[in-house]
Every structure is written in structure tokens, then in C-alpha cells.
Image: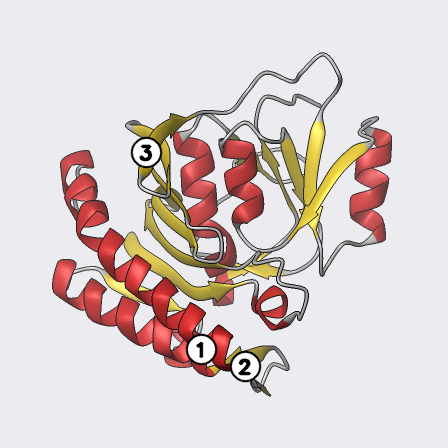
Amino acid sequence: MTVSQTDMKQMMDALIDPVRAAGDAIMTIHASGVAARDKPDGSPVTDADEAAEAILLAALAEVAPQIAVVSEENAASHTMAAPDCFFLVDPIDGTKEFLRPDGNGAFTVNIGLIRGGAPVMGIVFAPAHDRLFTGIVGLGAAETTKGTRRDIAVRDVPATGPVAVASRSHRDDATNDWLASHGITETVSTGSSVKFCLVAAAEADVYPRFGPTMEWDTAAGDAILRAAGGRMEYPQGGVFAYGKPEYRNGPFIAYGGFRP
């Protein structure tokens, strides 16, 4: 299937309002109190995940009915062999952050488009902070906050040294060892795909991840990072690819201007 940059721009523009609507639904449920249930794999799911996914899947069916969708809460889609072009949807990335009582707000709505094994378009919305990130590889990335849009791009590492972002809920010894081995001492801890967006928006320089993730956790943020001039690699090198068995990720390093 051929999907041009013009096609992607039209799809992205048409999906922004549904993504915001999904965020509104999430925040309404969040304000009324959230109860989680365990899925068969032991991860949590809430009414907010399901409400947001319903909005997103309906929008994708209208905007791009010819493109397959793999979504976190649709378990049947996880057994589909990855086509050349498909969407990856995570209605709430950072469910554990969503369930935290501290009001951090580090959870996001995510739609990523994969073409030829690479993320080429992404939308990430952090509804608690009204931060909407968008990107199309080859056309650039942007952030819209409280009605103001600005282009974003990765930065050169500041003279004070690189800043890493790391998982708040899933930080592990492997991450700590990688940071230490690269002399990185300043770290911002947060949740969800916001971490990719902070690197893309020049608020941090690198995001190492060694714990388990799924492709729908990373696709949208990865696309935005790549559109902003960053890159995503395996720790041993090589461009990070999508369409893996069961859509399961291994370790990765998401780079802004930092070079190991």
C-alpha cells in the first residue's frame, strides 16, 4: 500500500479531534474515580482505556478504512501478521501513571502509523497537561499546548551535560548501568510516551529503555522523535523495527542529540 506524506498529513489532521475527544473521555473518567481490572497478561485496564479506544477505532475506520489497526485493548489484533502499512494504537499509555493518586498526569493517547517496518506518523496527546505532539517523518514535528503550536526538533547536548528521561514505574538496574556507563547523571523520571516527546521537544537528550514494552507503547512517540531529527536504535546498534512477533519490543535507546 502506498501512503504518501500528503496522505499522512490529511489523516493526521483528521485524527487530532478524535484524539482530543479520547483525552476528554479519559479525563472525565479520571475525575470521577478510576478502578482497574487485570487483563489476562496481568496488566491493568480501566473503563477509560476502553472508552478512549472505542473513539480512536471509530475515527480510524472513518479516516483510513483501508489501513489495518493493531490496538492494545483488541487482543485479537495482536495475532495478526503485520502488514506493510498499519496503525498501532494505545488509548492510554502509562495506565499505571493514570492510576497513581499523585496527579502527575504522565499518561498519553497514542496513534502511530507504521510503513515498511518504520514509524512514519505519530500523534501523542497528554490530556492532563494539554500537550499535543505530532510528527510526520520528512515533514517535521510540532507541539500544540493551550492553543499555541510550535515546531519542535531535537537539540545539541547542552554544555552542562546530557539529560536522560527514564521510566518512573519501570526503571531497572540495566537502565541505571547504561546511564552510569555513559556518564549521564541528570535524569528526568516520568511515564508513558511523554519520554519520547521530551527528547523530541529538546527538553532531554536520550531515553534508554531495557524493560519490556509493546509496539503500541512506542510507535507514536518514536515517529515524533524521528520526525524531530532523532533516532531509535537497539542498544547494540541498528535501526529499531516494527512488526515483530506479537508486536513485542526488546530494549532500545531513543536518541536526540546525544551520541554514545
Q: Mark 2 points at which residue?
A: 34
Q: Residue 227: x percent and y percent?
A: 39, 31
Name the amino acid type tagged 1: Ile
Q: Residue 108: x percent and y percent?
A: 47, 58
The residue depicted at 43 percent of the width and 57 percent of the height is 127
**Side of 47 where 161 appears, left or right:** right
Cα separation between marks 2 and 1 = 7 Å
Q: Mark 1 points at which residue?
A: 29
- Can residue 137 be seen? no
Name the amino acid type tagged 2: Val
Name the amino acid type tagged 3: Arg
The tag earlier along the polypeptide, 2 or 3, is 2
Asked whether the beta carbons under mark 2 and mark 3 sit within 8 Å of each other, the answer is: no
Asked whether the beta carbons under mark 2 and mark 1 sit within 8 Å of each other, the answer is: yes
Q: Residue 199: x percent and y percent?
A: 56, 34
Q: How crowded is mark 1: few (under 14 residues within 10 Å), some or many (20 or more)?
A: some
Residue 67 vs residue 238, the one in the foreground = 67
